Amino acid sequence: MERERYLFIGDSITEWGRFEDEEGLGNNYVRNIRDHLALEKPNQIPEIINRGIGGNRVTDLVARWQTDVIELAPNQLSISIGINDVWRQIDDSNIDQVMPEQFEELYRDLIKQTNEKLPNTRIILMEPTVIEEQRDSKGNQLLKPYVEIVNKLAKEFRLTIVPTHQAFIDYLSKVPDCPLTIDGVHMSSTGNALMAKTWLDTI
């Protein structure tokens, strides 16, 4: 029986350490998911492919979708994007900002393209997580429309939605002792564990 192929694509949160890792996974939520699956079904471990690249926005995914998704033809495709689309608005760079309308248009096109070319691929959308560990930070306020768009697209195309943003906000409301990030965006081990748990609980 041929192994299933799971592909994870996104930004640095997905990438984290994959280029320095012999397995190409990195030290992130993708590895946590793989390790859980390996323990649950040791004889049926899917092939896990990590295609996260630091700094990526939805426009970057568009540029590499053919080679990094379509040509790899995964059985399951998990997409996590949106943090950098918002971060560019906060750092005042005013360079290549991706506003919500463009974000939705490009994201919708990626889903349509995948459905047309890979009709048997299950698409999983992950909400963008958080920007700063204060629920009402400027970053999290700006992030809200993007989270809503991801949920809107999941409903429109009847896709699985992993509520990672909501899971983080719920956790932060408890004023935890363990930080979820190392800098407000990139995951601590606890943040990776929460992302993986939310993904696994949903899937």
Image (spheres, rainbow, N blue to C red):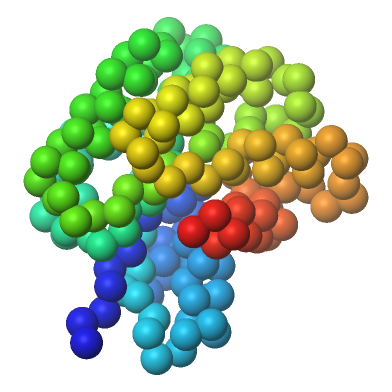
Residue 159 location, x and y as percent?
Answer: 37, 42
Residue 187, percent from left and from top = 62, 49
Residue 144 visible in image: yes
Q: Residue at x 31, y 28 (%)?
A: 107
- Give the answer, above or below, for where 82 lies relative to 88: below
165 or 112: nearer the viewer? 112
Q: Nearer the viewer, residue 195 or 98?
A: 195
Which quadrant of the rendered structure holds the N terminus? bottom left
Q: Position of residue 144 (x, y in %)?
A: 58, 20
Residue at 52% of width from left, 46% of height from top?
A: 162
146 horizontally vs 196: left or right: left
Q: Nearer the viewer, residue 88 or 48?
A: 48
Q: Answer with the quarter of the image where residue 111 lies.
A: top left
Residue 121 lies in quadrant: bottom left
Q: Is residue 20 visible?
A: no
Q: What residue appears at the point 32 percent right and 48 percent down from the top-left corner?
A: 123
Reply above or below: 27 against 119.
below
Tell me which residue sits at (54%, 55%) in the image.
202
Q: Is residue 151 left or right of residue 168?
A: left
- The answer to whether 65 is drawn above or below residue 131 in the figure is below
Q: In the rendered image of this protein, does residue 46 appear above or below residue 151?
A: below
Q: Position of residue 183 (x, y in %)?
A: 68, 39
